[in-house]
Image: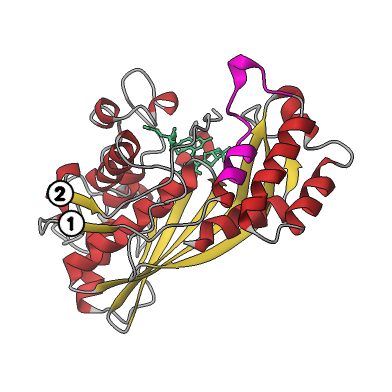
Amino acid sequence: MHQYRDLVTAVLRSGEHKPNRTGVDTISSFSQHYTINLRDGFPLLTTKDLSGSRWHSLLSEFVWYLSGEEHIRSLREETSIWDAWADDDGRLETAYGRFWRRYPVPSTDSQLPGEAWPVDDHRWRNDDGTFDQLAYAIEQLQENPQSRRIVISAWHPANAAISTLPPCHYTFVFNVQNNRLNVHLTQRSGDIALGVPFNIAAYSLLATVIAQQTELTPGTFAHSIVDAHIYCGMGDRGAWYGEGETLDSLRNRLEAVDNPSEYRDVRSWLLESAPSEPANQSGYDHIPGLLEQCARSPRSKPQVAIDDVSLDDIGVENIHLSGYDPAPAIRFAVAE
Ligand SMILES: Nc1nc(=O)c2c([nH]1)NC[C@@H]1CN(c3ccc(C(=O)N[C@@H](CCC(=O)O)C(=O)O)cc3)CN21
Ligand SMILES: O=c1ccn([C@H]2C[C@H](O)[C@@H](COP(=O)(O)O)O2)c(=O)[nH]1
């Protein structure tokens, strides 16, 4: 899968130094887009190891999206990746599944015509009056696959305005061509090293599951990332990327790479030139690890098989990965 290397190098070549709310600076690029063909295998990155506990975290997160839960009380028993953004009770304002499966509909007294359910037992209406967007999408794919309106939104302005972390991947569209189910995801903010590999895998799983439920075959995953960024460290280390000639030197070195193995030379130059990360703040500069990943050749894609169970019954144990032969793991620290 060449798309990930292309994404990393495009962000480094076009991005600007951008400090942000986390205190870990980024190299950030406006508007990146790529597509991945899902017909020739599953796009789990092979240039770093995402098997074992990482795959388990990823699957648990995906199953949690499908669950519609607005809390992480079950998720946090499987993985800690969302713990920092939830309260002690496990409530998480970002809960994607809440919006996918139970999108709030305005209360009766504030509804305008067209914002209400026509009848109380409407088929996409949950018992509490919320809207199951995923059930609606599946029904449309079955009954009206030519539709260009199969949009799911996780963006709720009132929630986003007060949330500790408003949804990053906030809307997606299903589109069928030639009996193939394509998914287009729009993400407002993408952490290239940590979040994006999980996001690619989750939406590719979604395409696979929904294709199976609708008797289509998975087609293409398309991904648009508005603020596509690579974290580059805290304090002096992060600031170094914004100084004088640093980014120009980095870009010139990237430009001069003929053979991917030379990304390791760029990495060595960087580690020699940059202020070192303090021991208690290591791993927040993702650029060395990503350059190592760029130097590695992508291997053939693994396969994913999903048991034939209903959408509401899918668990981690129903999703099977085979033929995954990744390069060694790379550790990246999470900017909170
Ligand atoms: N800065 C940042 N980046 C993100 O990707 C991110 C956030 N914040 N906040 C909310 C969620 C949580 N997500 C996360 C958080 C951590 C990992 C992570 O640490 N991944 C490790 C493996 C973790 C494990 O083994 O469980 C990795 O190596 O991919 C991944 C996604 C994605 N999101
Ligand atoms: O699925 C996800 C969730 C989060 N991220 C990243 C993108 C940003 O680095 C942070 C969120 O910070 P904001 O300041 O709210 O943009 O998390 C991701 O890549 N994928």
| Amino acid type, callout 2 | Asn
- Considering depth in this image, is 306 or 166 the residue closer to the camera? 306
Q: Quadrant of the C terminus?
A: top right
Q: Position of residue 7 (x, y in %)?
A: 59, 57
Residue at the disc numbered 1: 306
Mark number displayed over residue 318: 2
Residue 27 appears in the rendering? no
Q: Alpha-carbon neighbours of circle 1 within 10 Å: few (<14), some, or many (≥20)?
A: some
Q: Residue furthest bottom?
A: 178
Secondary structure state at the residue bearing disc 2: helix
Q: At x 70% / y 61%, what residue is drawn?
A: 258
Q: At x 41% / y 61%, what residue is drawn?
A: 172
Tell me where the magenta segment starts and ends, as one range.
Answer: 276-292
Which corner quadrant of the image does residue 95 belong to?
Answer: top left
Say which label, 1 or 2, has the lower sequence index. Answer: 1
Q: At x 58% / y 39%, what residue is drawn?
A: 289
Q: Position of residue 56 (x, y in %)?
A: 28, 38
Check if residue 281 falls in the magenta segment. Answer: yes
- Considering depth in this image, is 280 or 138 the residue closer to the camera? 280
Q: At x 32% / y 24%, what residue is drawn?
A: 90
Q: Ligand 1 is found in which quarter of the picture?
A: top left
